[in-house]
Image (cartoon, grey):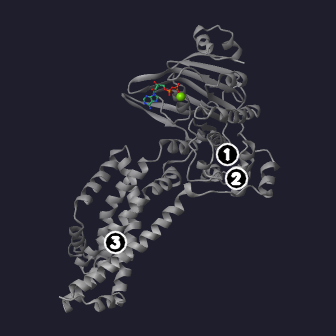
Amino acid sequence: MTFNWNYMFGLVADAEFWRATWTVVKLSFLTWIISIALGFFLALAKQSKRRLFNLPARAYIWLFRSLPLLVLLIFIYNVPQAWPASTVVLSDPFWAGLMAMVLSETAYVAEIHRGGLLSIHKGQTEAARALGLAFFGTQWRVIIPQALRVALPSLANEYISIVKLTSLVSVISLTEVLMVGQRLYSENFLVMETMAAVAFYYVFIVTVIDFLLKRLERFLDVNLRNVSRVPDAEVLALATQQRPVLARAAATGNEVPALQATRLHKAFNDVEVLGAVSLAIQPGEVVSVIGPSGSGKTTLIRLLNGLEQIDNGDIKINGQPFIHLEKQGAQKPRFIENPAYRLNIGMVFQSFNLFPHLTVLDNLLMAPRYHKLGPVEELKQQAYALLHKVGMLDHTWKYPHQLSGGQQQRVAIARALMMRPQIMLFDEPTSALDPEKVNEVLQVIEALAQDGITMVIVTHEMNFAFKLSDRIVFMEKGRVVCDDKPQVLRSGHNPRVEAFLKDVQLA
Ligand code: ADP
Ligand code: MG
């Protein structure tokens, strides 16, 4: 038997093969893009805690991963027999094929997305929530861009599978590459030569697309970006022209606390971690929360801004209800949060939680733009001014991974200040830092205290707390043991506080 090389090479320039190649590219690309978009909704639904969403999502993924694509193709192509109105679309094998492939691929892609979504640290969602982003805003601006980056290698792999699966669509007589080959060899019986040409076309498509996807992957990888842009004269002028507007004015008179928590309770898995904690913060006051590890300081801060739901008690802002529980007879009380007050509270996390896919400037601008707090140029000016204030103006166009921990935390403080919160909450802002970076962050916080910003600071930096605070709250085992002026705590009235402070050399 001889192999007809000339015939095979002739097929490489065959017009009908190239038309079929274009069909394969269109079909596979559309399938891929549509499945990626729909797959996200499916993945989010499957992750949802509500059965209304997660049950149908689970059922869909289970069903369409079990069905062979061939069965689905023939089924969809024949739907017009039972439902004539669908003839308009489904009598065309391209659209019928696309529909069957999307139905099937969405189930696979959803699982790939879920892997990407799970890889995003929960601190990202919390940071977005603390900045007042709602569910879809958080997904769209914070989670999906990052998850997509993680999932891209798997998605690229899936694309290659899709290209090969398009050959199945020949069963519903779509003229794709395999179909063209089959027609040829059924006439001339040069099966080997024709199939070698068919193979060439598939390898060609996959190679080109693979190359393009690798380029895309590199383009999206912020870790490979090294930004060297520094502020020019114009930006410097904007940054120093006027002092940043720091806080929104308290809505009411002086007597009402800016933040008032009354008898907060919180249990995790039936173990009480906070019991009847009350706290009132007056406008302009700086309050530090200290105490041993596990005493409930982080939990308290997280209850105050709604990141964790209270089991009992209520929280008021400027005397107005912010968080409370609505009793519903014998049922579990409903958690109610007034979203209008969410932005009155700014939060700085122990682990910074900057958005790694955004530059420093975009980290600052994201939430104010989401909330449409003003024209972009004005917001930028505010961002420059704040970055100048925290000493980070030179790093405006860098990505978080290019910064040290102390620098990241200073950016995180500026990001929270962009929303002009009335009260700033800090949860051990320096605990994740190298010792030599601690001071640069403490200095920034101290400057804010001098500007009169109302602050609640959980900290282990005792000298800092005692120097800066108007009041210090000492917590132990989920209770407030002592809530008083620093001088009173120092005086040794309370034996438990004294024992805790004994090891700390107060300056
Ligand atoms: P602190 O910040 O003072 O070190 P935390 O508020 O982090 O204390 O924790 C108080 C207690 O609550 C600890 O015993 C901790 O293990 C528990 N705890 C905190 N968060 C959770 C959670 N999500 N699930 C279960 N237990 C938790
Ligand atoms: Mg803590």
Choose mark 3 or mark 1, whichever is in front.
3
**Residue underneath mark 3:** 163
Q: Measured from the top left, where is residue 359 in percent x and y? A: 62, 53
Tell me if residue 96 can be seen. Answer: yes
Q: Report the disc number at residue 379.
A: 2
- Between 323 and 172, the residue placed more toward the observer is 172
Q: Measured from the top left, where is residue 16 in percent x and y? A: 33, 88
Q: Classify mark 3: residues with Cα within 10 Å, few (<14), some (14-19) or many (20+).
A: many
Determine contact: label 3, label 1, CB under 8 Å: no
Position of 110 with respect to 180 (left or right) is right
Position of 287 with respect to 149 (left or right) is right
Q: Measured from the top left, where is residue 495 in percent x and y? A: 59, 8
- Relative to 110, say whether 15 is above or below: below
Tell me if residue 85 can be seen. Answer: no
Q: Earlier in the sequence, mark 2 or mark 3?
A: 3
The residue depicted at 63 percent of the width and 40 percent of the height is 409
Amino acid type, mark 1: Met
CA gap, disc 2 to disc 3?
A: 46 Å
Amino acid type, mark 2: Leu
Quarter location, residue 213:
bottom left
**Residue underneath mark 1:** 418
